[in-house]
Image (cartoon, rainbow, N blue to C red):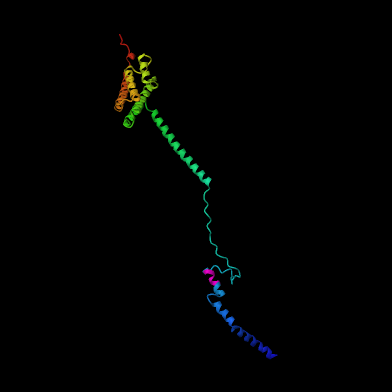
Amino acid sequence: MLAQQGDQPLCHHAAAMVEANHPGRQARNRDIGSPRFPSRTAFTNRGILGNPGYNGGLMNPQTGAKDLPDIADIAGPELLPDFWESMGLFAVGLLVLAAVVGLAIFLYVRHTRKKQSLESPLQIVRRRLDELERDAADLPPNEFSVGVSDALKDYLSKRYGDPVRFETGEEFLYRLNQAQANALPMSVREEVGNFLSVSEEIKYGRPPDAEARKLPLLAQAREIIRAEAAARSAPNPSARKAPAR
């Protein structure tokens, strides 16, 4: 019995030696340590593809749980603005721009009208004639003639309330020859008639020398204004008091 019990360790030791020396066992031991089949420890430490944070889902020997993979931030897709939202913003921008431009035009027109309203009729007609003289080289004869004629007619209508502004030269001369009511001073009536005749000849007749007659027509209008201002500023003989006896 003792011999049998003492032989059991020897038998187990002999079996282990035989198993270790078996050719297949030796081949497996060689493969486990080779680069083709790394050991479990090396596999766990290096991870897959050189990523230490991932061990292929193997159990963590310290915690007994699987290691979680690294979580990388993923940027979401950029959302393009909605089409109607863009159109709405564009329309609002246009409305704001139109409002600013309209306000600027309104303020400019109001300022210009206010400035003109402070001018006297004499200042207005002189300014208009000066503007026509500056643009004389660029204006055709008929357009220049209309501008000078309208400036003078507007002045006389505002100053005396005479309907010459709405009459042709022929109508004015007819009214003058018929001795009808005429608010213009006697000293300028004939000159105004001559001016209107020359103006309409340039405007409608289109004579060959129309270009050369533009500046003389302008000078004639200025002479009428000068004579009218002098006649208006002269004392009225009828207003003089009779000498005391």
Q: Is residue 58 above or below residue 101?
A: below
- Residue 236 lies, in percent from the top left, at 33, 16
- Residue 228 lies, in percent from the top left, at 32, 21
Residue under the image location 47 percent in, 41 percent down = 94
Q: Is residue 226 above or below residue 101?
A: above
Q: Residue furthest right?
A: 1
Q: Is residue 208 magenta?
A: no
Please give left or right for residue 40 compared with residue 118 in the image: right
Tell which of 207 and 240 is nearer to you: 207
Residue 38, by quadrant, is bottom right
Residue 7 appears in the figure: yes
Looking at the rendered image, the quarter that the C terminus falls into is: top left
Please give left or right for residue 176 compared with residue 69 in the image: left
Residue 242, by quadrant, is top left
- Residue 165 lies, in percent from the top left, at 39, 22
Looking at the rendered image, the quarter that the N terminus falls into is: bottom right
Which residues lie in the magenta part? Answer: 44-49
Q: Residue furthest front?
A: 208
Residue 61, by quadrant, is bottom right
Tell which of 141 and 59 is nearer to you: 141
Please give left or right for residue 118 compared with residue 23 in the image: left
Secondary structure predominantly adopted by residues drawn in magenta: helix
Residue 123 appears in the figure: no
Picture mark count: 0
Residue under the image location 52 percent in, 69 percent down = 49
- Residue 91 lies, in percent from the top left, at 50, 42
